[in-house]
Image (cartoon, rainbow, N blue to C red):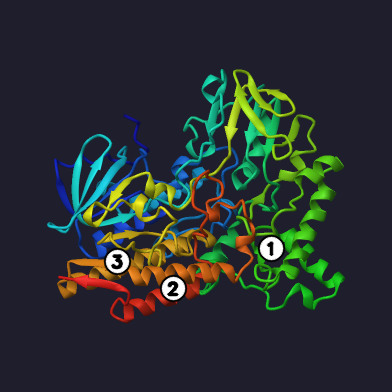
């Protein structure tokens, strides 16, 4: 049994077939807030089941070198408690994984949440019992629980995608996936390291590993755009200003397209002459971070406008990377800027100027196998002591499908989603009564600043359950036709943008072999989505069946 974190108590395991009003799966941002609202606002008997030995969710597992949030700390945080906002002070513009865990532990301890969280508990199955109108859950340890409501707070990026490469089992060195990083860390000193993957995770990890390792070989499938983070400490004066203006900051975030508290420019890059356009991009580059996308209004809806941003970043890469051949390999050509998750970095491109870093293009020379001593491509073998898989996640659907969830008449979620995920508002699945999916497929989720999306979902679910209790209602289920209309709208919203043009994006599930190619998040904007959810509730939960 893993040791407890400071201040953490381990609640007793539930007795056989213990029954709750609600069981929540996951103790990250979503699970903690959902527990708080159900327990303290509605007075429900609620239980959180968490596979790890502490709170943190995605940030419990993601401890790889360089792991940081790509939203700024002051708004990558809860807004529900002004006390928390005033008492907690972030140290950096972009918090590293340890600081985010400390923050979540601070919140959990402040509201005494850990007494209702069962750690080291992985859910194996959940089946809806129609006769009793209960969800029956079993854990991998064989424990049984029942609950009226099942709420999944499993996260969108928590199911590690480990590629099936021949020979991995014969590798004599050590290998790790960034999403399952050892708590004690990994010492790269004097080691030959192979890093597979150059998405957001690989872009964060590469500079840190290169600074420690004897040699780093980066295996790149797809070249990626990246914007400098410009990370640094948050000074006392800036903290005071943030805390004094939190109400306005939160209002702006909730009213925005992506849950960020900053404005998007109202003009197009095509409205400006080239010197003015380049000056705008240069200023955005120097500021850094995700705000680069806000330099113009139509970067994700107009290909010609996007081309100006893509070309600007490509020119930056060619300027930063000294070897023209390597620079060309690192220059994205197969997708427009920000149509895949847009990373931010700390000296990522500069890393390839180091003498101890090699870049391998595995589109041109594919990996054939992992040997006992390294990685063999179609062109060469690279001797390695450590392999790091920065190959991302089976995103959005993977964490849910990892659990054997069965709804009405034994219908499995895997079967219901065999052609891709189908939800109503990303909140419920037809055929699965009383099951809510926080930031599920079909909601804005990964296209937003996640705490904004999480709080909106949790508040909606809490209000819905509160309404049901006041009205004496026992069951809520999405209507199949409402789910079909919503899926069509999600596709329509995606197709109104350039996002589907990134054929290798995990937004489409393209990073997992055999996964249906369906655009999963809702691209219609956070504020617009929240309005739709509010309208549904105001119209007597239109699109749902509620029953006594």
Q: Quadrant of the C terminus?
A: bottom left
Q: Nearer the viewer, residue 258 or 254?
A: 258
Element marked by disc 2:
helix
Q: In the rendered image, which residue does mark 2 sit on?
A: 530
Residue count near mark 3 (Cα–Cα under 10 Å), binned few <14, some 14–19, many ≥20: some
Asked if residue 215 lies left or right of residue 391, the reply is right
Residue count near mark 1 (Cα–Cα under 10 Å), binned few <14, some 14–19, many ≥20: many
Q: Looking at the picture, how far across and down is residue 240, in whole percent?
A: 55, 64
Q: Is residue 529 visible?
A: yes
Contact between labelled residues 2 and 3, with CB atoms less than 8 Å apart: no
Asked if residue 55 lies left or right of residue 244, the reply is left
Asked if residue 485 lies left or right of residue 193, the reply is left
Asked if residue 232 lies left or right of residue 87, the reply is right
Q: Looking at the picture, how far across and down is residue 440, in whole percent?
A: 41, 59
Element marked by disc 3:
helix
Instruction: Tell me the quarter of the picture where residue 133 sits.
Output: bottom left
Q: In the rendered image, which residue does mark 1 sit on?
A: 292
Contact between labelled residues 1 and 3, with CB atoms less than 8 Å apart: no
Q: In the rendered image, which residue does mark 3 sit on?
A: 462
Q: CA distance from mark 1 to mark 2?
A: 25 Å
Q: CA distance from mark 3 to mark 2?
A: 15 Å
Q: Looking at the picture, how far across and down is residue 322, in whole percent?
A: 85, 42
Q: Is residue 375 above or below residue 422?
A: above
Reading the chain from its start, which is encountered first: label 1 or label 2? 1
Residue count near mark 2 (Cα–Cα under 10 Å), binned few <14, some 14–19, many ≥20: many
Mark seen at residue 397: none
Q: Nearer the viewer, residue 98 or 296?
A: 296
Q: Is residue 388 above or below residue 547?
A: above
- Outermost residue to the bottom: 539
């Amino acid at each position: 049994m893993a040791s407890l974190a400071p201040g953490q108590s381990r609640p007793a395991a539930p007795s056989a077939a213990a029954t709750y009003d609600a069981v929540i799966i996951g103790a990250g941002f979503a699970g903690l807030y959902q527990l708080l609202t159900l327990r303290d606002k509605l007075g429900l008997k609620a239980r959180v089941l968490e596979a790890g030995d502490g709170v943190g969710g995605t940030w419990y597992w993601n401890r790889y070198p360089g792991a940081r949030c790509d939203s700024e700390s002051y708004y990558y945080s809860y807004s529900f408690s002004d006390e928390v906002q005033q008492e907690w002070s972030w140290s950096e513009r972009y918090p590293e994984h340890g600081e985010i865990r400390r923050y979540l532990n601070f919140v959990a301890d402040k509201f005494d949440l850990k007494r209702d969280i069962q750690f080291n508990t992985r859910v194996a199955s959940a089946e809806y019992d129609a006769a009793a109108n209960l969800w029956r859950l079993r854990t991998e340890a064989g424990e049984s629980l029942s609950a009226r409501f099942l709420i999944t707070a499993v996260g969108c990026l928590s199911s590690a995608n480990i590629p099936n490469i021949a020979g991995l089992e014969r590798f004599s060195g050590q290998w790790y996936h960034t999403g399952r990083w050892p708590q004690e860390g990994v010492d790269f000193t004097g080691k030959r390291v192979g890093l597979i993957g150059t998405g957001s995770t690989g872009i964060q990890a590469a500079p840190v590993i290169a600074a420690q390792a004897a040699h780093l070989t980066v295996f790149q499938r797809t070249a990626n755009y990246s914007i400098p983070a410009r990370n640094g400490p948050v000074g006392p004066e800036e903290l005071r200003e943030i805390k004094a203006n939190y109400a306005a900051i939160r209002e702006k975030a909730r009213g925005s397209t992506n849950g960020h508290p900053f404005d998007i420019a109202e003009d197009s890059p095509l409205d400006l002459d080239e010197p003015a356009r380049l000056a705008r991009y240069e200023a955005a580059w120097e500021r850094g971070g995700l705000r680069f996308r806000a330099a113009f209004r139509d970067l994700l809806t107009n290909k010609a406008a996007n081309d100006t941003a893509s070309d600007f970043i490509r020119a930056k890469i060619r300027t930063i990377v000294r070897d023209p051949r390597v620079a060309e390999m690192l220059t994205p050509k197969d997708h427009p800027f920000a149509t895949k998750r847009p990373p931010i970095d700390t000296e990522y491109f500069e890393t390839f100027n180091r003498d101890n870093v090699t870049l391998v293009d595995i589109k041109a020379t594919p990996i054939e196998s992992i040997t006992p001593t390294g990685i063999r491509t179609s062109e060469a073998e690279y001797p390695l002591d450590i392999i790091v898989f920065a190959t991302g996640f089976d995103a959005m659907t993977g964490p849910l499908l990892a659990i054997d969830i069965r709804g009405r008449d034994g219908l499995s979620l895997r079967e219901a989603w065999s052609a891709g995920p189908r939800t109503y508002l990303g909140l419920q699945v037809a055929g699965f009564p009383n099951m809510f999916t926080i930031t599920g497929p079909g909601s804005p989720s990964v296209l937003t600043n996640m705490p904004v999306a999480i709080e909106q979902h949790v508040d909606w679910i809490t209000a819905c359950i509160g309404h049901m209790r006041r009205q004496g209602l026992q069951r809520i289920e999405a209507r199949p036709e409402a789910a079909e209309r919503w899926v069509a709208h999600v596709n329509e919203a995606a197709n109104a943008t350039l996002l589907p043009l990134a054929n290798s994006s995990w937004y489409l599930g393209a990073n997992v072999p055999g996964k249906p190619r369906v655009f999963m998040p809702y691209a219609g904007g956070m504020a617009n989505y929240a309005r739709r959810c509010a309208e549904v509730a105001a119209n007597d939960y239109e699109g749902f069946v509620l029953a006594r």
